[in-house]
Amino acid sequence: SQKIEQNSEALNIQEGKTATLTCNYTNYSPAYLQWYRQDPGRGPVFLLLIRENEKEKRKERLKVTFDTTLKQSLFHITASQPADSATYLCALGSGYALNFGKGTSLLVTP
Amino acid sequence: DAGVIQSPRHEVTEMGQEVTLRCKPISGHDYLFWYRQTMMRGLELLIYFNNNVPIDDSGMPEDRFSAKMPNASFSTLKIQPSEPRDSAVYFCASRNLGGGRGSYNEQFFGPGTRLTVL
């Protein structure tokens, strides 16, 4: 069955450092992958989309890589800030629906 | 535009009662999705609609769950009868395939309805 794995343990980093979150998947050939941010008590908010034929995508301090051979995506936040603290969800899609991972909690301390 | 609107924001009910959750998608969006989020299972897709027509309801847990979309600006998710294991946060999301607000495949989520079944 399809499986999407994100690190269930929270990631704690110091302000200014680069945060790297991992999304691994099995039994899946997604056409695209998305990353969402979710704050407590709120719905997920879209951040970035990367397609299967793209290796890397950037948006301001965010960078996403997509390796379809390793079946892995890495999500980087450079120069992290306490305001980046949230849960980050990866989502895989091959049509109109998305299949979400459980998310990784990021805590950036001053 | 106010974004995706969901009501109620919180619902507490007793086992066996009927629960109806409501969603108003972003105007012009042609896809609407219902999700359920729990700590154990994460964010699960229950059902989605395209132009008010249900496309895939394979995520609906059982016959106690039903969803309708009578028009482009309104959808409901009904649970009858409700059970304690239905307690979760239910999200509605919408997207547009082309034109309007949002890029291709981006989903816009509502604030969710936190359901507690006692």
Image (cartoon, rainbow, N blue to C red):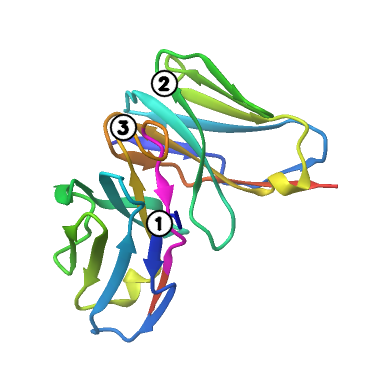
Task: List the residue tagged with mark 1.
Answer: B4
Task: List the residue tagged with mark 2.
Answer: A51
Which residue is found at the position 76% from the left and 37% from the top? A80
Local packing at callout 1 (Cα closer than 10 Å; few below 14, some 14-19, many 20+) is: many
- Tally of numbered tags: 3
Q: The magenta stretch spans which residues?
A: B105-113
Q: Chain of mark 1?
A: B
Do circles 2 and 3 both sit on a common chain? Answer: no
Q: Which mark is residue B98?
A: 3
Which amino acid type is shown beneath numbered disc 2?
Answer: Arg
- In the image, is residue B112 part of the stretch drawn in magenta? yes
Do circles 1 and 3 both sit on a common chain? Answer: yes
Residue B112 visible in the current orientation: yes
Residue A23 % position (x, y): 51, 32
Which residue is found at the position 44% from the left and 72% from the top? B9
**Vertically, is A86 above or below B22?**
above
Q: Chain of mark 2?
A: A
Q: CA distance from mark 2 to mark 3?
A: 17 Å
Residue B35 % position (x, y): 34, 55
* Displayed quadrant of residue A30: top left
Is B56 left or right of B104, judged from the image as shown?
left
Which amino acid type is shown beneath numbered disc 1?
Answer: Val
- In the image, is residue B59 part of the stretch drawn in magenta? no
- Which element type, helix, strand or loop, lies under badge 1? loop
- Which element type, helix, strand or loop, lies under badge 3? loop
Residue A44 % position (x, y): 49, 50
Q: Nearer the viewer, residue B109 or B103?
A: B103
